[in-house]
Image (cartoon, rainbow, N blue to C red):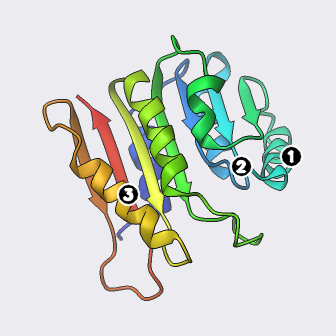
Amino acid sequence: MLQTALHFSHTLLKEVIAEGDSVVDATMGNGNDTAFLAQLVGSTGNVYAFDVQEQAVINTAKKLADVNLSEHVQLFHQGHETIDTAIDKDILIKAAIFNLGYLPKSDKTIITTPNTTKQALDALLPRLTTKGRIVLVVYYGHAGGEAELTLVQDYCQTLPQESYSVLTYQFINQRNNPPILFCIEKK
């Protein structure tokens, strides 16, 4: 059975993340990816998770506490465009995940934007380790979503193939704008 974009994103991350790695959840949302990443990096790794919404930080902190994974996770109540200044420049990142769009079951007017996403990608790429991956799951069926999808597609298509491999994964026969997954791997 084909995996959903969400499940495939986790498969792509599991393939490269090991205990002790440093990783980023660029859009922590309800904390599902943050907890997943914390399990993968273990007690010697670090997770840096970002979100502009206070409720996302609260939900994530609770989820991490409930499963005893709060240690080695730093929650930032700020947008992913601040990755460049929030994470020490000498820290190498093994993987990052973005779920672009809005926080499910919350204010649908608070969305990720092409500008902030580009800033985050620009900050992450130079810090990405060899064989490291950035996974972007783009939900685009809302106002502003198409512009962000275009930014991600254009950004990924212009990455030099000598340095990066880029994969896209999507279901093309589903209704209601199913998410599109992009995976950038540094060679």
Where does label 2 land, which residue?
A: 31
Q: Which mark sits nearer the N-terminus, 2 or 3?
A: 2
Q: Nearer the viewer, residue 172 or 7?
A: 172
Q: Which mark sits nearer the N-terminus, 1 or 3?
A: 1
Name the spot of residue 87 as percent of width and height, x first. Answer: 61, 22
Q: Residues within 10 Å of mark 2 (few under 14, many from 20)?
A: many
Q: Residues within 10 Å of mark 3 (few under 14, many from 20)?
A: some
Name the spot of residue 132 as percent of width and height, x first. Answer: 37, 30
Q: Can residue 179 be seen?
A: no
Q: How many marks?
A: 3
**Residue 30 against residue 142 in the figure, above or below:** above
Residue at coordinates 51% horizontally, 45% vertically from top-left?
97
Spatial CA distance of label 1 from label 3 is 33 Å
Q: Amino acid at mark 2?
A: Gly
Where does label 3 land, which residue?
A: 151
Q: Secondary structure at mark 2?
A: loop
Q: Residue 134 appears in which quarter of the rendering?
A: top left
Q: Which mark is residue 62?
A: 1
Q: Amino acid at mark 3?
A: Leu
Q: Secondary structure at mark 1?
A: helix
Q: Which residue is the extreme one toward the front?
A: 115
